[in-house]
Image (cartoon, rainbow, N blue to C red):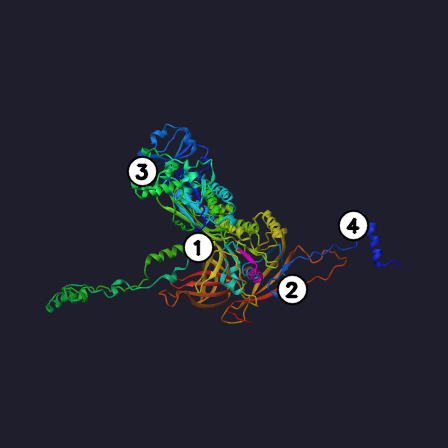
Amino acid sequence: MPTAAALRLQIETALAHRIPSSLSPAPRTIRPLAPTGIFTVDNLLQGGLPLGAITEIIGSECSGRTSFALSFTAQITQTGKVCAWVDVSNALSPESASAIGIDLNRLLWVRCGVTNPITPLSSQISFSLPPKYLIVPPVKKGLHGGGFGPHPRGEVKGLSTAVSGLLRPEAIAPRCAEPQRRTKVEKEIFEPNPPQSIRSIQRTLTPRKSWFKPWSKIDQALRVTDLLLQAGGFSAIVLDLGSIAPEFASRIPLATWFRYRAAAERSQASILLLTQHACAKSSAGLVLRLQPAIALHDEPTVFTGIEHRVEVARERFTPTNVVPMRKQPQSDRSASWHSRTAWAGQR
Amino acid sequence: MTRPAELYACLYAKELPAQAMLRLRPQLRERPFVVMQGEAPLQQVCSLNTKARALGVAHGMTKVEIDTFPSVTVLPRSHAEEQTAKSALLECAGTFSPRIEDRSDDTSLLLVIDIAGTERLLGSPSKMGKTLLHQVKLFGITACLAIASNFHAAICLARSMSPSNQVAITTSGQEGLALARLPLTVLDLPEKYAETFSLWGIHTLGMLAELPEKALVSRMGQEGRRLRLLARGELNHLFIPLEAAFTLEEHMELDTPIELLDSLLFVVGVLLKQLILRTTTRVLALASVTITLSLEDATSHTRTVRPALPTNNRQLWIKLLHLDLEDHPPQAAILALSLTAEPGSTSKVQLGLFSPQLPEPMRLDVTLARIRAIVGEDCVGRAMLKDTHQRDGFTIEPFTIPSESSTEVTSTQPRVAIRQLRPPENISLTLIGHQPKAFFFREKQYTVERAYGPWLTGGDWWAPTLWGNEQWDLIARSRDGELLGCCLLRDLTQNSWQMAALYD
């Protein structure tokens, strides 16, 4: 009786001219992955994010895209590799990056569309009294330090004018027969000095819609990413389009993403794309969609953290490429995790 | 005690002013060319090339006389360029022997190199001489070389040589014979002695050497004895070696003011080639290059480029200088430029088999310079945190690949990241009982679910600043159910609200 292997070989050779290697599955390609540092997400993705591919992370503001990308970058810098953060909206906070565990020496930060830095000026306003309330420096006259001449007799000189200066004018004004109106004493107002700076603050604090027309920033960021991919050697490049409205981000030509995908494959760099809406389409190797977050209310007085939820929207490289005959049990395609603020402590 | 064997090589380059100019202007070498010196109406030819001499141009001709030769190119004399040419040749000679004496005069270069005892290292004197002349030729200078065991004999022989006769070697003891046929002019005699000798009918060194010593001393004093010994090739000399500092500097004055950067880079390329030649002879590389441009408005523009690793790649240096000057262009036309360089050790990078893949330092330098040209000077690099609680308490430093391993510790728990809004955006906010209740942000209305705060911020206690800011952490939700965790700042002096950061 022929064995199963012999039968299989017989069938395969019979069908070879029509279907080559019909019964033996194609060798499985193991694609390298890098962990994200978030346990539940690593479990969901069976190891982490793919190397040498574009990973697109979609979500609204506050959905957890930045903390996810920073956590992944921290894992990479820990292994001694270098990463680049192309910051389209100049929104990265190095303090929080450091708190997450990124080695800032290994992170090249490129800030696009930076205007001149404006610091809130209110901390620079110094309050001071008007000069008339300050002690006037003594006028030097004669030989003595503050006297009025060489002789003590001269010291009373000018005393009468000084006394009259102290008195209010109505006290010494000549009285008339008809009653005189009392002059109303104006209340003195202390104002911060100098008034010019306040005007300049008001001018600078007029609404600036820097997020409104971001074309130049996007253009800069895409050119910079191109250069970084050409230079090679960066293990992860994060292109942060997270604050760019979908109507702008979706206008980036698809050829750009295709080019990035090819370059990433060549240099084995992971490109993380943070967006509000899917842009890279079929060029993305993995698309993660972050659902609106839920705030945690652990403490009544301080903000302690957010619960994020993520689901896999698209995965280009499935673990196996054998198409089963039966429908397989579907695995859960979503995960959630809690991220805490730095001041919340360990929980 | 026997005297140690002496051997001197005398390197002689005539017409140094013209050769120094032609060194950096190779296109003029095939044309008649003169260098003039002096104040404007009284200029005179101080140096010229062979092509000009063939036309009939001579030293000391005035500007009017030169104007009768239409094909002659005229340039004013530049002492700075001569000095750089001279130091380049000194560098070159220094690679053969550390003992060099400089006997140059105003228009020619004369270096006497003590090469005694270098045979085993550099080969025979003739081989060494050819190598030296080849090196000198690479610098763009034509020179001749005489080798003799007497210092003064070597000088006299070198002075008498024509450039076609490149290396002349005189064996020890034969100096008198070799010098005998030379005219008295090679001795550089004072005028009164030259006149006396011509009256006596003495025209060559051989004739001078034959004169009886005592009779010569009785007529001319000790100077007569010295001249006789010189002519016989027997005068001893105390060698005073020159100790030149190793400075890498090239200077060039442009013929016409340049405004275009591209045309400047051609000149920069020529100067860099010279600098790189000098560093390679010392097995060094250029670590940093400073370019100083003298501008038409009597100011100067200085830029320094320092890549991550010292390199001798000329194309890389030109690209880095180009990108830097494009970023910081000079404000007026350029009259002259000088390049100063610092040497560094040639870069050796030992790559590990299991070390992570990192950017190549040279390519990274060019990439960073290109990115700087796109986004601006202060917007590329690595962030360095300052020890402060102020907003944006960081500085940007140039990015370099760190060699040591990372010391940061990743937090075990996922942390909330902050997205800063730079500058903070103004918002309008509704307060009920001193608590925020609703606000408009980016043309959307949000209702506040939770408000944490206020905390007073801003100001250092030691500085005379106001604590005029309040910070609030708000959890708000828009009408379409979107959550917004944000950090708000309230300016107490202005009573205005600003969105400072978002928790993401």
Q: Are marks 2 and 4 on the same chain?
A: yes
Which residue is at 30% across, 43% downward? B221
Q: Which residue is mark 1?
A: A207
Q: Quadrant of the C terminus of chain B?
A: bottom right
From the viewer's side, name the closer residue of A241 and A27: A27
Decide which of tag 4 and tag 1 comes sooner along the chain.
4
Q: Which residue is mark 4?
A: A20
In the image: residue A144, left or right of residue B391: left
Residue A149 position (above or below residue B264) = below
Residue segment shown in magenta:
A69-85
> Between marks 4 and 1, how big is the CA–CA gap?
67 Å
Q: Position of residue B213 (x, y in %)?
A: 34, 41
Residue A164 position (above or below residue A15) = below
> What subunit carries mark 2?
A
From the viewer's side, name the closer residue of B451 and B265: B265
- Nearer the observer, disc 1 or disc 3? 3
Q: Which residue is mark 3?
A: B193
> Between marks 4 and 3, how big is the CA–CA gap?
107 Å
Q: Quadrant of residue B463?
A: bottom left
> Between marks 2 and 3, how big is the CA–CA gap?
103 Å
As helix, strand or loop, the secondary structure at mark 4 comes to: loop
From the viewer's side, name the closer residue of B225 and B471: B225
What amino acid is labelled 1 in the image? Pro
As helix, strand or loop, the secondary structure at mark 1 comes to: loop
From the viewer's side, name the closer residue of A307 and B43: B43
As helix, strand or loop, the secondary structure at mark 3 comes to: helix
Residue B223 position (above or below residue A127) = above
Q: Which residue is mark 2?
A: A43
